[in-house]
């Protein structure tokens, strides 16, 4: 019951966050246009990729070791802050050194944008890792507020900067950076009140977390490449205008993927404290239900997506409206992959090498196919990327499904096909919620 309530709570905030982010996306797209939106999308994709590259899996390691009671939580938190400050400084220094190359390759020569990224990167690292840690503490009240705080701040700021003062893409970047500082300061304050932390570094705790975290880090990098490599390939083959169209596609399919995100955010700390057999059974049940809900959401987005983009984003983004559906099968496959890989990473003896293998193969396939299909379908870049996206995520799902079945002995029908008992579960939960609301 508590697991369901927590998922429902996170899901509700995810829905609210998605609505606010859609408002942000619409305002940004309408006011700056496809080309500037492409630069903006590349800017924050680069920021997220740098964070993942230097995070070393300490967030996921914190969750795992806190739930397994292998580390004291205040030591994990203090290490997180100290480590983020140190790594944030050196990563910012690296950005400064390579600012001309990065700006010329990705951001149309705007090296000032790289300087802004270097400024905000340490805050992104601290706040992002802390947001992962609070899930390990089961403080989803803090996590949910953090989840919604940044997009709401951004909505207020871009409404003022773009609509009232008729700003440009730089105004939007300023707004997002200020939102990151506000949300980061808030979560740091909440953690400080919770644990009265100090700026200390606990070497033995760091080694324990790094032992799990380094494997999780490799996993995250392989998943990051799988998820992000297409935007860089697209920028190489096309221009910022097409990248901006691709950004709208990501926004639309994001309305599907938030289902698996809501579930996986709660699932990770939950299964990290279970025995292996219970982990397998829980993952099997959650995977088939996630797949079922994702398919329903995908059908709705397929039917309404074009109308939605044309209505809210305008004629400038008709290209995205006409081609977003090429990515829908891949989103469905990816949602199941994300849940299934939690089985391997949450066991009493984790097997991170299995999802690393799956996502690494997927990253290689998506890179190769993106290059091939962009040359074959050179008149439709989004179709080319969509096909590569689908094939690569299907391969990942097949690898994870086969190994999960072989490892656990659970039938493929038991973790990919919805059961009658699941419908009964839904029915009972809806009746329960209905009666609670009625009271």
Image (cartoon, grey):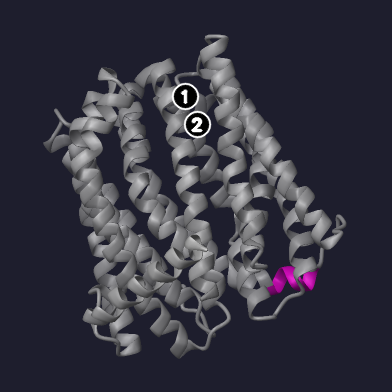
Residue under the point 27% across and 51% down: 366
Q: Position of residue 364 (x, y in %)?
A: 30, 55
Of badges 2 and 1, the one in the foreground is 2
Judging by the rendered image, the residue that carries numbered circle 2 is 43
State the separation of the CA atoms marked 2 and 1: 7 Å
The quarter of the picture where residue 74 lies is bottom right
Q: Position of residue 88 (x, y in %)?
A: 69, 44
Q: Position of residue 269 (x, y in %)?
A: 57, 71
Determine whether 364 is above or below 383 in the image: below
Does the magenta portion include 72? no
Label disc, if present, on residue 107 of the rendered structure:
1
**Pointers 2 and 1 in contact (C-beta within 8 Å):** yes
- 162 sits to left or right of 192: left
Determine whether 254 is above or below 102 in the image: below
Residue under the point 67% across and 70% down: 209
Q: Nearer the viewer, residue 244 or 254?
A: 254
């Amino acid at each position: 019951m508590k697991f369901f309530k927590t998922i429902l709570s996170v899901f509700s905030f995810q829905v609210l966050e998605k609505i606010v982010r859609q408002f942000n996306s619409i305002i940004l797209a309408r006011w700056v246009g496809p080309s500037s939106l492409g630069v903006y999308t590349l800017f924050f994709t680069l920021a997220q990729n740098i964070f993942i590259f230097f995070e070393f899996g300490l967030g996921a390691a914190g969750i795992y070791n806190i739930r397994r009671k292998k580390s004291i939580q205040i030591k994990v938190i203090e290490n997180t802050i100290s480590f983020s400050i140190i790594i944030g400084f050196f990563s910012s220094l690296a950005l400064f050194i390579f600012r001309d190359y990065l700006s010329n390759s990705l951001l149309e020569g705007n090296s000032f944008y790289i300087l802004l990224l270097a400024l905000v990167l340490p805050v992104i690292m601290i706040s992002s890792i802390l947001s992962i840690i609070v899930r390990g503490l089961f403080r989803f009240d803090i996590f949910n507020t953090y989840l919604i705080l940044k997009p709401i701040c951004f909505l207020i700021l871009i409404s003022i900067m773009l609509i009232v003062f008729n700003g440009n893409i730089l105004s939007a970047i300023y707004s997002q950076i200020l939102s990151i500082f506000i949300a980061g300061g808030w979560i740091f304050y909440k953690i400080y009140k919770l644990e009265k932390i100090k700026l200390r570094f606990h070497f033995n705790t760091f080694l324990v977390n790094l032992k799990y975290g380094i494997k999780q880090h490799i996993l995250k990098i392989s998943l990051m490449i799988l998820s992000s490599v297409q935007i860089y390939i697209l920028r190489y083959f096309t221009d910022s205008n097409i990248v901006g169209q691709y950004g709208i596609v990501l926004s639309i399919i994001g309305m599907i993927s938030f289902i698996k995100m809501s579930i996986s955010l709660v699932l990770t700390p939950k299964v990290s404290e279970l025995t292996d057999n219970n982990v397998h059974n829980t993952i099997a049940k959650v995977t088939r239900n996630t797949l079922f809900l994702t398919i329903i959401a995908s059908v709705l987005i397929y039917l309404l997506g074009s109308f939605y983009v044309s209505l809210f984003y305008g004629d400038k983004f008709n290209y995205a409206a006409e081609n977003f559906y090429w990515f829908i099968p891949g989103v469905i496959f990816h949602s199941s992959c994300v849940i299934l890989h939690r089985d391997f990473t949450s066991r009493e003896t984790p097997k991170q090498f299995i999802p690393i293998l799956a996502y690494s193969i997927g990253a290689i396939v998506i890179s190769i196919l993106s290059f091939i299909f962009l040359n074959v379908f050179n008149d439709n870049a989004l179709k080319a990327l969509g096909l590569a996206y689908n094939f690569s995520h299907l391969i990942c799902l097949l690898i994870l499904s086969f190994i999960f079945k072989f490892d656990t002995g659970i039938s493929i029908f038991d973790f990919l096909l919805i059961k009658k008992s699941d419908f009964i579960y839904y029915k009972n939960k809806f009746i329960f919620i209905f009666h609670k609301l009625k009271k």
